[in-house]
Image (cartoon, rainbow, N blue to C red):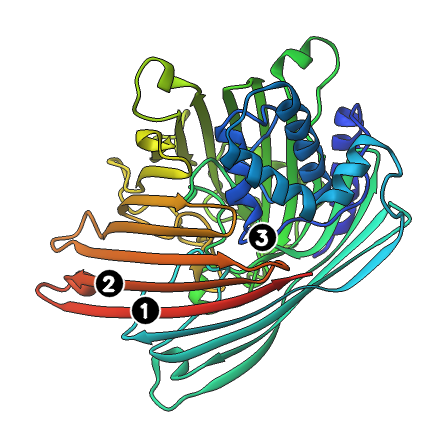
Amino acid sequence: MKGFLYKILNVSMIVGSAFFYSTISYASVNIPLDSPFYTDIQTLIAHGVIKSDLSSTKPFTRSEAGRLLAEAVDNAETEDISPFTSKILDRMVKIYREEISEARIPGGAPSTYLKPLEEFSITYDRQDGPFSIFNNEGIEYFDGNNAVIEFQSSARLWRVFSFFIQPMVIYNENYGGIEGNDETEFRLHKAYLKFTVDNFEIQAGRDSLWWGPGYHGALLLSNNARPFDMIKISNPRATLLPWFFRYLGPFRYNVFFAILDEELASEHPPNSELFGLRFDFKPHPVLELGTSYLVHFDGDRPGIESLSFSDYFYALFSEVSRGGDKRDSNKEVALDITLTIPNISETVPVADSIELYAEWGGEDSDYPPDRRAYLLGMVFNDIFMAQGLKLRTEYARLSPKSVPTAWYKHSIWSMKYYGRVFGHHAGTDSDDLFIELFHQINPQFLYRLAFDKERSGLSKEYIQEKQQFFLEARYGFKGWPNFTVRYSYEEIDNVANVKDSTQENHFIGAELSFWF
C-alpha cells in the first residue's frame, strides 16, 4: 500500500489534464452489469437508433444512459423505426426520464437526492451436482439449495458526489461441496463513492468491470470474479477529443488500481495490485475500436522491498521480465473491434443487421506478445426478419501454441480474484463455443435458449469436455417487477482431465426483482 494514494493522485492529474476537454457531466452511479438496461440498449443500437455508443466498455453510468436515450429519442422523431423498437424506447424513457432531462438541460434533475431502496431482489437456485457457475460476480452456488437476498441504494450530493451500495445475504446448503455444511453470509457486494467534475470522474470502492465486445466472456476483464476494491478514473460520458483527434469519434477511457485478495486459491501474493488501462473509440457509427492493458504486480512477499514511485513506473510499463524481483509483473494486452452492418435486409433478407466482433490478446513475452488468445463473435439481429429475435455465436481460444498454459497463470501473479479468473471463465489452456437464440417478444417478455461447449486442458492427454444447455425466461410486470426462471443441464466428460470420468449436473432457479 506504500505510495498507493500518491500514485493515484499523480495518475489522476496526468489523465485529467490530457482528457479534460469534454462535454459537461454530473455525478451518477453505474448501472450494474446484470441490469436489463444492457439488453434493451443493445436493441436500440442494433436498430440504428443510437449511433454514438461505446458498448465495449462497461458499466455505463446513468448519465451516459441519459445521453444515449436522448439521442435515441431525437433520432426516433426523424427516422422510421419499427413499433417494436418504439415500445422498447418508450419503456426505457420512463425508467431514465431524470437522466434524459439532465442530458438535455443542465440542472434538469435534482442536484441532491437519496434513493434508499432502488432495487430489491430474491433469488432461489437449486443444484443437483457441482454445476459450473460463471459470470456471476463471484457468487457461488453448491449442490442443494441456494438463496440470495439483495438490495441497491444510491444517492447524489450537489451533482458532484454520488454513492452506491449493494449488500447481500447469501445462503448455501453444503457450502464448499461439504455435505451438511450449510452457511449464511452477509456480504457488502458493491459499494463506492464517486467525485465528478465536468466529465472527469474518480470512483473509490467496490465494483465490477467488463472490457471488450464479448457477450459470453472477455479476455481481460469480465464479471466472472467478485467486484474489485479499486480506485478508477474515467470520463463517464463519451466525448470528442480536441483538434484532429476528434476524427477518432466518441471516446472513453478507464484507468484503475485494485488491491487483490489474500486467498491461497488465487495463486498470487497477498494484497497484490492490479493496474488496468482502456481506451475506446468510435470513428464511424458502425465501427468501434478498443484497447485494454492489465498489469498484476507487487504484493506481500517475504524478503522483497516495497516499491518506490519510480519502481511502479517500471513495473507497469517495462517490457523486460525481471525474474521475480520487486519490479517484476504479469501483463496482458488486448485489442478489440466491433463492426455493425445495418439494414442488410434491403439486399439480403436474412436479418435486419449483423454485428461482427473480435478481441485479440497477448501475454507478456516477446514483442509483439507471442502467447496469444482470441475471441470471435457474430450476431444476427431480427434474424429471418422476426422482430426481437437474435442469433449469436461466440468462440474463444485461450491456449496459445507457444505456451498453452500461459493465459491467466503465472509463477507469481495469476489473474484470479477470490479463486476465480477475472477474464474469460473458461480459464487457461481452453476453448469455448457459445450459441444463443434470444427472443424479446415485447418489452415485458423474453426468453433465451443457449448451448455452450467448453474444452479445458487442451494440451493434456485427456481433454475435459463440458456441454451446457440453458433455458431462461423473464416477464416484466407493470410497476417494474421482473420474474425470471432458469434451467440448465451440464454434461462433463473426462472430469479434471481424468479418462472416462463423467458427471451430469442440473441447475434450476427463479428470481423476483423490484425496481423502484
Task: List x then y, in percent, for residue 123.
Answer: 49, 71
The quarter of the displayed image where residue 150 is located: bottom right
Dot 3: element: loop
Precedes in sequence: disc 2 or disc 1: 2
**Which residue is depicted at the point 30% across and 50% down?**
450
Instruction: Tell me, for residue 428, which label it has, or none.
Output: none
Q: Amino acid at mark 1?
A: Phe
Question: Dot 1 surroundings within 10 Å: few (below 14), some, or many (20 or more)?
Answer: many
Q: Residue at horizontal 80%, vertical 52%?
A: 162
Q: Residue at x 59, y 29 (%)?
A: 53
Q: Is residue 376 left or right of residue 150?
A: left
Q: Say if mark 2 contacts mark 1, CB within 8 Å.
A: yes
Seen in the picture, residue 507 relative to 394 is either above or below; the reply is: below
Q: Which residue is mark 3?
A: 208
Question: Where is 18 relative to 207, above or below?
Answer: above
Checking the image for residue 490, the label placed there is: 2
Question: Are there few (<14), some (14-19), or many (20+) residues within 10 Å of tag 3?
Answer: many
Give 340 or 289, whichever is nearer the viewer.
340
Instruction: Using the image, tell me which numbered label, if any, was put on residue 507.
Output: 1
Q: Quadrant of the N terminus?
A: bottom right
What is the three-letter code of the residue carrying label 3?
Ser
